[in-house]
Amino acid sequence: MEKRRLGNSDLEITPLGVGAWAMGGSGWLFAWGAQDDRDSIAAIHAALDAGINWIDTAAVYGLGHSERIVARALVQYRGPRPYVFTKCGRVWNEERQIGKRLRAESVRSECEASLRRLQVEVIDLYQIHWPEPDEDIEEGWETLASLQREGKVRWIGVSNFNAGQLERVRRIAPITSLQPPYSLIRREVEEEILPYAGSHGIGVIAYSPMGSGLLTGAMTRERFAGLPEDDWRRRAPQFQEPLLSRNLLLAEKLAEIAARHSRTAGEAAIAWTLRRPVVTGAIAGIRNAAQVEGVIGAMEFRLSDEEILEIESTQNAQRAG
């Protein structure tokens, strides 16, 4: 099983990781609708059995619920312990309203809460979830560096930072990883952010490589229309016309190319993301054990240069049209 070193760390991670966002369940602003906890635990176990060796979650996913589910899954698992990555910078109140915090006191409190929910003594990778408030990112990063020195977390990274923000915090302490959105339909990071990460030895963990389900080959207009009211994708721009039609056509092209190799469209989408050497790994959100089979092949699947050109020619033609 291929493993890749994550940035300046000693973490050797598989090209694919488990994304636990949807495992947070319903009842919060960025939910994916209702989720059966038993399905979540079975999905984690199936992914680990298939060779994946890391899980990415966040405190805010389900307002703590995702972290608790990850803990339950790992307590029940009898195989090797995977790396556990989580994030700080989002807090909530009794009314389930989410706030943005990066002040030292909040970050420390959040870290302690995540350690308790995850039932671990140390977090393998602790990340600032969003660079908000912007004026507090230095204080937040200084706090993560302190937590690392104290042994609360092993390595520290950021998520959703731009190049300027990366430079600001890099002066304080080394950045192990960056977690940006990156897929065929979210390519903004290619121009400046990925080159910055590559030139400074920062590992990149891409999230939503399958476009939050748009590029799996399973999304249709009918399925989108039937999404639960509390599924955040109902409000997302990429799921609205005319982008929805363009994205579904792109998924058809991915499915066509993937079928030549007995792969899925989702595996082709992830393989496209992993084609860049600067991308260390990609996060695959899974909600049940069966979904693991539709993504696991991406760890070894390699698109040819001709197939990459074919995919991007299709995308360019859509933009021109």
Image (cartoon, rainbow, N blue to C red):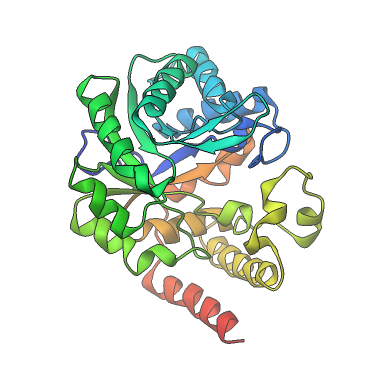
Q: Residue at x 43, y 66 (%)?
A: 188
Q: Residue at x 67, y 52 (%)?
A: 233
Furthest-bottom residue in this view: 321
Residue 296 seen in render: no
Q: Is residue 188 left or right of residue 285?
A: left
Camera-side residue: 131 or 250?
131
Residue 28: image location, x then y, percent? 67, 35
Quadrant for the N terminus, please.
top left
- Who is closer to the viewer here, 266 or 31? 31
Q: Quick check: can you spot residue 38?
A: yes
Nearest the camera: 43 or 94? 94
**What x and y, as percent, mark residue 69?**
56, 22
Quadrant of the image for the C terminus? bottom right
Question: Residue 308 occupies which quadrant of the picture?
Answer: bottom left
| Location of residue 190 in the rendering, given as x and y in whole percent from the top left corner | 37, 66
Residue 58 % position (x, y): 48, 33
Count of numbered marks: 0
Q: Quadrant of residue 218?
A: bottom right
Closer to the camera in the image, 256 or 215? 215
Vertical comparison of 215 with 241: above or below? above
**Residue at figure coordinates x 46%, y 44% from the top left:** 283
Q: Residue at x 17, y 47 (%)?
A: 171
